Amino acid sequence: MRFGRAYRRAPNSPLRPLLYHMHIPKTAGTSLRRLLESQFTTAETFPSLLWAQHWQQTDAQEQSLRQRIRRTVDYRFIGGHFDYQLKGLFLPRPVRRLTVLRNPEDRALSFYHHILANTETDFFVEDATGRWHEYPRPFPSLEETLSHPVFATMFSNTMFRQFAIDYNPEELRAKPHRMGPHFSFPFVGAPLSKDLYPLVRERLAKTVVGIQEHFLVSLWLFRCTLDLPIPLDAETRERPGKHLGLSGQSAAALELLRQLNVYDRWLYERGVEQFLTHVQTTAAKHGLTPPRGLNELDADFADQIRSCP
């Protein structure tokens, strides 16, 4: 049975810790989830489609599904596009959280290309009044999308929102739409402000943070911190050159991306600082030479962690 010592059943205690991968869209989450799921049995892994089914059930089916969702004492791992709290999904128990952050403008641009590639999928966005809008076809250009009063929110401060906005499962369940959580965007228009900085900083500090631009080191950090034998030879599904990056965009589009992701930029900078400090501390504990900065992570330090037991 492959899971870390921290996640084994404690004698006479039903409140075993739950490992929660807070999957932020387009941050190598699919690649990471597959690696993490391999460390747990199927019975210990929260079914990825169960929550989407909960959104779509009729009232007659709802009670049975609620019982399935809330009978969670045996689940050891969950990964998905949920908020920080997982409110309403799990019984009170210890939770260990991990996530991966990414350069905000790169992340938003990658998500735009993700939508372009999903030509058979419908995308719906909720505005501030609760009205749902379907993303049009043919797909508008990047600049048209980022200038739109509703559709621009799909690419705005997504990372920050998952830390800051606490979704109410019952309220989401009552919303008049039939799409699962991977294809609809509830509350993307929820107002943000700097008043949320202390809350997000506190939640960030309680989360093991990886950085997509340093995915190998992030895997090593998760491996050491969570006591899981995660392999270090994995790659993200999105490789450089897969689509036009920021350098291939117009100055106007780049400026719109920056304006739309001010809060994500703040979060990313805090996350990078926390990530580097955590890497340095963990390296010292394992007898490695700690990197002095991010620029040292892809050379000698990468060779050190590959040889680390």
Image (cartoon, grey):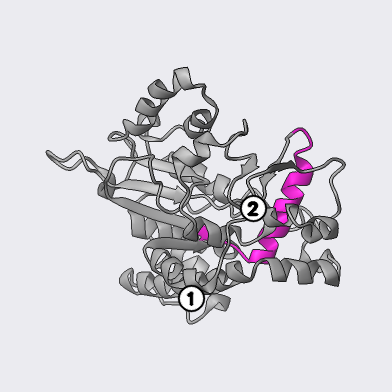
Instruction: Write the residue at 58% across / 50% down.
Output: 187
Between disc 1 and disc 2, the foreground one is 2
- Magenta-tinted stretch: 100-120
User: Label 1 amino acid?
Assistant: Glu
| The one of 50 and 216 positioned closer to us in this rendering | 50
The answer to whether the residue labelled 1 contacts the one labelled 2, judged by CB atoms less than 8 Å apart, is no
Q: Residues within 10 Å of mark 2 (few under 14, many from 20)?
A: some
Residue that numbered label 2 is attached to: 128
- Tell me residue 65's x, y (percent): 42, 25
The correct choice, above or below, for 305 with respect to 86 in the image is: below
Instruction: Write the residue at 33% across / 42% down.
Output: 3
Q: Does the magenta stretch include residue 106?
A: yes
The correct choice, above or below, for 153 with respect to 180 in the image is: below
- Tell me residue 272's x, y (percent): 51, 72
Q: Residue 273 carries which label?
A: 1
Q: Residues within 10 Å of mark 1 (few under 14, many from 20)?
A: few
State which quarter of the image contains the N terminus.
Answer: top left
